[in-house]
Image: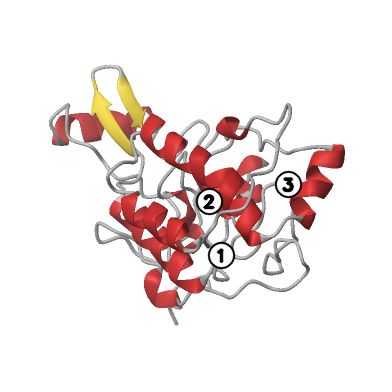
Amino acid sequence: MHLSPAVPAAATTASFCEPWASAPSMLMQEADISGHTRTPVPEAVYRIPHGGSSASGRFRPPPGLEEVGASGSSQLAQARPADTPVVPFWCSKGSFGHPQLCGRPCVHVAKGGVCPSGLACTYCHFLPHAAVVKPGGSMRRTLLAATDQELLATFLPFIRKKAGKEGLLPLANDLINLLEAEMHEPPPTSISLVSFRPMKMTFMHLVASSMRRLPLHIQVEVQRLKANLPPPALTPGSWGMSLVL
């Protein structure tokens, strides 16, 4: 009797966590800085654009691109024009928007192993990842004690600046407008960040840091923005496969 391989279960719905919070277990949903589990985003808003599937067999992603080796790259180069982008078949759900909007790096891939969740993984499969910038000491305690209004007043200017610097405008305008709508009048005084440099954070980390808990409609808008961004693509050429971010 022939048995078809089991399809891996879908990964737990992703949530948002301040970048300076301690990393959660892979088997637990992330929690916010107050200790409460964040409201999960409905599965309907998570989708793999460009016709991607939410399930995949086991694979070994980069570095090395083992499954797109010398023979695979030469075959793709012959089958496609040199300027035709190829969506990586090992690109996970959490990889979309890399490097500014993707999820945290997948621990399986980071250790050079195989991710059992495949395309359904909500963590990023692309390496390397920039180190997470975290405030230390008294600054961390100040941010943990801050209100949503203080955090918004502090991080919104950096969110606007980062979106422009990384070429995310005008796609990110709706998300920024929703965050601005959460501000009350008159706006509070922003927190003095002293030597902390928020511009070294990714756009997604800045957004996640702007409130203690992102409202559901803002989480949905984040997923819509990620779904409208193309994934990193492999472009075959005379020198082999190139990763286009």
The percent coordinates of residue 88 (x first, y second) are 35, 45
The percent coordinates of residue 173 (x first, y second) are 33, 50
Farthest residue toward the left?
81
Q: Are marks 1 and 2 in contact (CB under 8 Å)?
A: yes
Q: Residue at (29%, 59%) from the top-left corner?
A: 49
Q: Is residue 149 visible?
A: yes
Q: Are marks 1 and 3 in contact (CB under 8 Å)?
A: no
- Count every numbered label the image shows and give the total: 3
Q: Secondary structure at mark 1?
A: loop
Q: Which comes before the other along the chain, label 1 or label 3?
A: 3
Q: Secondary structure at mark 2?
A: helix
Q: Residues within 10 Å of mark 2 (few under 14, many from 20)?
A: many
Measure the alpha-carbon separation of dots 1 and 3: 16 Å
Measure the alpha-carbon separation of dots 2 and 3: 13 Å
- Which quadrant of the figure has residue 123? bottom right
Q: Nearer the viewer, mark 2 or mark 3?
A: 2
- Which quadrant of the figure has residue 147? bottom right
Farthest residue toward the front?
186
- Which quadrant of the figure has residue 32? bottom right
In front: 235, or 184?
A: 184
Farthest residue toward the right?
137
Residue underneath mark 2: 207
Q: Quadrant of the C terminus?
A: top left
Residue underneath mark 3: 20
Q: Residue at (79%, 56%) from the top-left corner?
A: 145
Q: Which comes before the other along the chain, label 1 or label 2?
A: 2
Residue underneath mark 1: 214
